[in-house]
Image (spheres, helix red, strand yellow):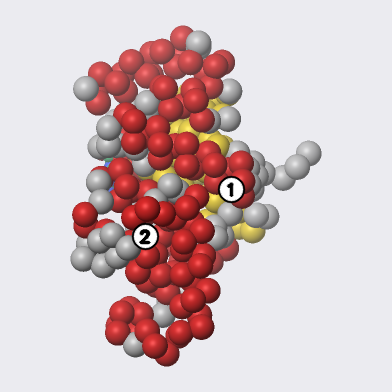
Amino acid sequence: MVEPLLKVENLIKNYGGLCAVDGVSLEVGRGQFVALVGPNGCGKTTLLSSIYGLRPSDGGQVTFAGRHIEKLSPHQIFDLGMGNAFQFPRLFPSMTVLDNMIIAARNQRGDHLWNSLFRRGAWHRDEERLAIRAMQLLELLNLSHLTFAKAGEMSGGQQKLLEIGRTLMAEPEMMLLDEPAAGVNPVLGRQIFAELDKLKREKGMSFLIIEHRLELIMAFTDWVYVMDRGKIALQGEPEKVINDPVFFEVYIGATKEKS
Ligand SMILES: Nc1ncnc2c1ncn2[C@@H]1O[C@H](COP(=O)(O)OP(=O)(O)OP(=O)(O)O)[C@@H](O)[C@H]1O
């Protein structure tokens, strides 16, 4: 059997007396698009944060590309090739889209932000290489027509895509995302998912994404985990999961709370 890229075993995260993540196990294979769904407060964000080392877990194991990561910091996890777009530094609204991409790459490598912003001549050759990579990614994300636009002038959906692009400057093998299509209109939401799907197909990237919109889950995901009260209540291929009475029960709860 092929070892999954991400393997979570029996993960536990408590907040005082509350067990927000209660022995969760899940897997994400290479090149797989996996969704995590569940009602408000069931522990989805805590689970992603614990996997990423943002909220250290209280038990269980997490392996990424064959390495234990449950004791690592988010920076160390990032260096191993897992990106996340939910805790990413904000965009610089008055700078161009291209500069936002280049600065993100420098930040991720730990270069000093001041140097990145004001001593750019010193990195001329490196800059050129980063600019080429940024432009390739903007093309892939359907943002190339905005390369020299100010980031602050983009729509909400385009800014979300730019945030994803900034994380991609480090060429992660996998990304964790918390509702990347939230707060944008359905057309842009679908576009964001379509671009992620393109990254999966063209670059073999893997995704673990919190999402509740059925339409997006059905169109783009390979596997769905349904979470309820800190536990995985159900998992399977999207068609199978949405026809399961357990999903119906949990999902109706989730959409009632969202509306
Ligand atoms: N920092 C915290 N301290 C204490 N309790 C917390 C903290 N963060 C979350 N919780 C609680 O942990 C539980 C899980 O919350 P979490 O945000 O992980 O759920 P969620 O499924 O992501 O919800 P949502 O869909 O609303 O984002 C909830 O009961 C929440 O109130």
Between disc 2 and disc 1, the foreground one is: 2
Residue 184: % across, % down: 27, 37
Q: Is mark 2 within 8 Å of ligand 1?
A: no
- State the residue at coordinates (58%, 54%): 173
> Which is nearer the N-term, disc 2 or disc 1?
2
Find ligand 1 in the image and state its quadrant: top left
Q: Which residue is mark 2?
A: 147
- State the residue at coordinates (56%, 15%): 240
Q: In this view of the protein, which residue sits in the foreground, 104 or 34?
A: 104
**Amino acid residing under circle 2:** Thr
Q: In the rendered picture of this protein, how many numbered marks are placed on residues? A: 2
Q: Quadrant of residue 89?
A: bottom left
Q: Residue most toward the right?
A: 1
Q: Is residue 18 above or below residue 128?
A: above
Q: Residue most toward the bottom?
A: 122
Q: Is the C terminus in the top left, top right, bottom left or bottom right quadrant? A: top left
- Which numbered tag is attached to residue 205? 1
Q: In this view of the protein, which residue sits in the foreground, 63 or 173?
A: 173
Mark 2: which secondary structure? loop
Mark 1: which secondary structure? loop
- State the residue at coordinates (53%, 35%): 34
Residue 68: % across, % down: 61, 57
Q: In this view of the protein, which residue sits in the foreground, 61 or 33?
A: 33
- State the residue at coordinates (51%, 30%): 220
Residue 1 appears anywhere in the view: yes
Residue 48: % across, % down: 43, 46
Q: For marks 2 and 1, give the CA distance.
A: 24 Å
